[in-house]
Image (spheres, grey):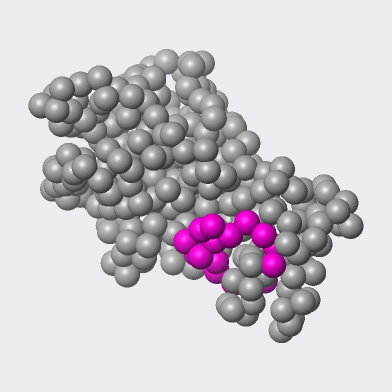
Amino acid sequence: MISSYKGRTLSWELKERVLELALHRGPCNEIGSHTLEELEKFATTLEAAGDQASVLIVYSSLQCGFCAGADLRELYLRLQGLARAEVVPALRDFLERIHRVMNLIDASPLTTIAAVHGVTFGGGFELALTCDLIIADKMARFCFPELRLGLVPGFGGIPRLKRDMGNAVVRDLLLTGRSFNAVKSQQCGLVSQIAAEGEALKLARATASQLTKFDRQTAAAAKKFIKPIPHDDLRREIDLFCELFLQPAVAAGLKRFVESKDAQPYLP
Amino acid sequence: MPDADQTLEQILDLAAKHFKVPRDKLTPDDDFFRTLKIDSLQALDLLTRLEQHFHVELPDYELQGVSDFRTLASRIQSRL
């Protein structure tokens, strides 16, 4: 495995059996084609990391937050250049690739921790949901804003949230599109620990150092037993996303979002 | 429980302190995006601080179109 890597959108480093993946693509780690390529590279490393690592920590080194989700600007511009018949195949290809990465992180034998702060929206929230534990800075906010654009989350968010939480919480997040703060998120079982401002990574590292003391095979077996990957729902989510994407309201919503000069573009 | 005027004062105090703006420069009818020179992400930060300070939940959609301190205070007051 590659024990350290510094890319355009992310970096990773293995140190004392803890693999740390840092996101650092401005403005707020939006996931587009470059991030996806590097996440695929990371997934290959993660698959080979079992012998040398016990814990994975995913975090953002940018001040704005963990991740603002999919790169909607890139998505919009890319799809604008395609004929209608080419849109869904291109979209499906992107979604299947990101799902493969998310599924690999979700099912990794390592114990995984998302150390989040600030904006943890859409695809960023979905990335955090692949992890076994979420450690949140007290200023973190979680949100699925996709319905505001006429869409549903497309990177595996609903099936994972449904697996981990009560259906009422899933409906609240999904159907209102409102954001939860860290305290609310901990109250409903989403967040494992809350850190003081700027301290989430430190807390994640402290937790990781405890986790590295456990027998790796036992921890991996326990995780496999308790955390099934909802493959059927994940496939249905891709189908639903592609079906909804062709509605005229989506193109209009994306256009409005991308061209918005509003002071509150996170509320399209 | 603070009354409406106290809520408004506390919001102005908190905004001035956090965004390092002289308190006497802030008035209830100011557009806080403009006065505090904040963007949407910093507005989310303000929302979180207000939720923590007043121990309330403020759904984002309630703040849609809200940009002055007085209206913000009335939204908070209705949840205290």
Camera-side residue: A85 or A125? Answer: A85
Q: Is residue B68 magenta?
A: yes
Task: Name above or below for residue A53 compared with residue B14.
Answer: above
When asked about the image quadrant of residue A217, the answer is top left
Task: Name above or below for residue B76 compared with residue A103.
Answer: below
Q: Residue at x 56, y 40 (%)?
A: A65
Q: Residue at x 64, y 73 (%)?
A: B74
Q: Residue A161 at x, y = what percent?
A: 32, 55
Residue A17 in the figure: left or right of residue A174: right
Q: Residue at x 71, y 43 (%)?
A: B37
Q: Is residue A42 magenta?
A: no
The magenta segment: B52-70
Q: Residue A160 at x, y = what percent?
A: 29, 51
Residue A220 in view: no
Residue B32 in the figure: left or right of residue A135: right
Camera-side residue: A258 or B14? Answer: A258
Camera-side residue: B58 or B61? Answer: B61
Task: Name above or below for residue A127 compared with residue A159.
Answer: above
Residue B9 in the figure: left or right of residue A214: right
Camera-side residue: A218 or B45? Answer: B45
